[in-house]
Image: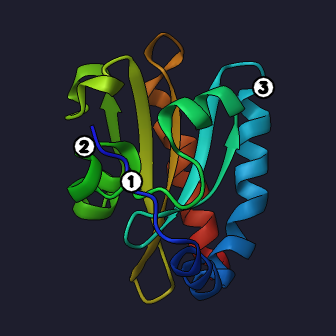
Amino acid sequence: MSFRRVEENEFERRREHSGELLEAALPHLHWFSGLLGSVPHVVYLTDEEGVILEAEGNQELIDRWRVAPGYDWSESQMGTNGAGTALVSGRPVAVIAGEHYNRAFADTTCVGAPIRDSDGNIRGALDVATKTKFGCPRRLLPVVYCAWAIGREL
C-alpha cells in the first residue's frame, strides 16, 4: 500500500486556497468529534481533490490510518473510501469494511459526503471513520447535514 503525502509547500498552498472552507468546516469537525465522544474515530476534511486539510479524533487512528493533514485520500490514490468516493460520485457514501478497495482498511467503516458551494461546485468532502465494530451507516445522516451546513456557509 502506498500513502502519498503532498509536499509541505503544496499543502500550504492548498490550505490557503481552501481557507474559506476550513473556516466554515472547523466548528463542524469539533462538534462531530465531540458527538462521537469516547468512540474511537477520525473526522476529517479534504479539499476538492481529496487531500486532507484537517483531522480530529483519536490520534492513534489518525497516525495508523494516515488520515492526517497533507495525505491524499482521493479515490484514485487510495481506492474506495468515504471522502474520495464521495468526491468522485458527487454524493454521500458509506464504505463499510471489505468495501474498501485497500484491504488494510477491511476493518474500517467510513461515511462521507461532498461539500458543495452555493453554485453547486464540490469544494471538499467530510468523512467520519471508525473501526467497523463502532461503525453505523445511520451516521451518514449527520455527515450529510454537516456537509450541507458547511456548504451553506461558503
Q: Earlier in the sequence, mark 3 or mark 1?
A: 3
**In front here: 139 or 29?**
29
Q: Position of residue 3 (x, y in %)?
A: 37, 47
Residue 43 lies in what quarter of the image?
A: top right
**Number of other residues with Cα within 10 Å of mark 3, as a class: few under 14, some 14 to 19, many 20 or more:** few
Lateral position of residue 18 relative to residue 49, left or right: right
Specify the label residue 29 is tagged with. Answer: none
Question: Label 2 belongs to which residue?
Answer: 80
Residue 26 lies in what quarter of the image?
A: bottom right
Residue kind at label 2, given as amino acid type: Thr
| x 54%, y 15%: residue | 134
Q: Position of residue 8 (x, y in %)?
A: 58, 72
**Number of other residues with Cα within 10 Å of mark 2, as a class: few under 14, some 14 to 19, many 20 or more:** many
Residue 58 appears in the rendering: no
Question: Label 1 belongs to which residue?
Answer: 73
Question: Label 3 belongs to which residue?
Answer: 37
